[in-house]
Image (cartoon, rainbow, N blue to C red):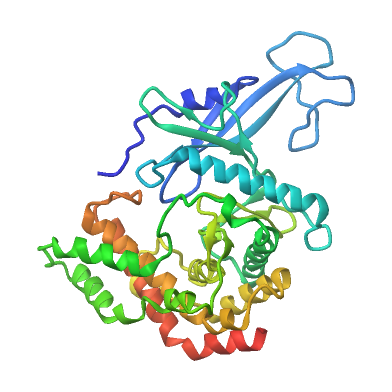
Amino acid sequence: MRQRNTHNPADAAEQFSSTGSLVEIQEYGSGHVHDTFLVTIEREGNCHAGAAPMNDENQPVRSPFRNGGQGDFQRRERFILQRINTRVFHQPELLMRNMSTVTGHLQRRLQFDSVGGGRRWDVPCVLHAQDGRDCWMDPHGAFWRAMSFIERAESFDTIQDEGHAGEVGYALGTFHSLICDLPMENLADTLPGFHITPLYLRHYDRVVEKKRDRSSPELSCALRFVTERRAFVEVLEEAKSQGKLRLLPIHGDPKVNNVMIDSVTGLAVSLVDLDTVKPGLVLYDIGDCLRSSCNPLGEAVDLWESVPFEADLCRAILRGYLSAAKGLLTRNDCEYLYDAVRLIAFELGLRFLTDYLEGDVYFKVRHREHNLHRALVQFQLTQSIESQEEAIRRIVLDLR
């Protein structure tokens, strides 16, 4: 069975909020792996006149908990709290070491390099617990961590329009351009085999061999889909082994809801969720970004048969990406880009299907058929990508 949230997040929140009082904890986001919460705390202190903290209406906030003079104020702050899923990330210490390495590198780069002519770009910061460590283990053995919350920004589970699509592409291109010179030997491999599709297929084969009940029409459809597409799963790994594609630091999970958008300007201001930063192919990232963003119905759609891949969104994302990372893609990267988006969509479907067959041990689910439904969504998306191969290749050629 998957890891359940039987631990009290308030206990963990207090470990990261020693200088403030806890106001509110609420579940946050739609992540598949960790349990994530948005924590609001209240800090009190004495401020000189004119230096009081402000609320959203730019008015000073006076503390209701003190009867002091006009200099006594309180302010509310927010941060992200996560319980790390150790069934997925077996060594949370390495996870946090990577996080510090990556955020430190990004912050140093931003001291010398402006983004997009000086536009806003935020890097989430790791917060430390009362004992000075970057994570806290509760009495039940669960690992918790906290990160700064990016204010005045929001994320979306689906692309809103072509302008939003361009900003998602710009965010990924900006991230790649900032992290491309990070020495790869400084990064621990927190998920060995991540995005190596042939490994996922071998694991699937071991799992499906033990599955005897295939009476469900949906399951039969999914199994057949995998059988019909086994031949192409080696495409990127073969190109890598032949020296056609090179390794660089990548994000690993640049789906649409990991891109933070400024609530006022509509511009991308950050790419969050840095758990899977590691050496890899930039095409893993671009393929995953396109897979996630070019399906305007999202992964939670009820009718999986209706899922489309929108080529116009693909064009907007790639244009935004190249505006920030021009020169990063090689000719071979461009030649294999279609294969990447097709493969990554198939790969995620394969992972969902395998998890369903194993009894939901990796991804969080709401019901027993949830992972099977997710797999069918990705397989339908794969089929839509395949039906538009010529158009996608033309888009890449036009933008080169």
| Image height of 19 relative to 32, above or below | above
Residue 99 position, x and y percent, is 58, 44
Q: Quadrant of the N terminus?
A: top left
Total numbered circles: 0
| Image height of 313 relative to 16, above or below | below
Residue 276 position, x and y percent, is 50, 53
**Residue 255 visible in rendering:** no
Q: Quadrant of the C terminus?
A: bottom right
Q: Is residue 162 left or right of residue 111?
A: left
Q: Residue at x 27, y 74 (%)?
A: 226
Residue 302 position, x and y percent, is 35, 64
Residue 58 position, x and y percent, is 80, 36
Residue 138 falls in image quadrant:
top left
Q: Nearer the viewer, residue 29 or 246?
A: 246
Q: Is residue 284 left or right of residue 183?
A: left
Q: Residue at x 60, y 84 (%)?
A: 396
Residue 60 falls in image quadrant:
top right
Q: Nearer the viewer, residue 343 or 186?
A: 186
**Residue 51 visible in rendering:** yes
Q: Is residue 220 left or right of residue 189?
A: left
Q: Is residue 152 left or right of residue 192?
A: right
Q: Residue at x 71, y 74 (%)?
A: 326
| Image height of 48 relative to 143, above or below | above
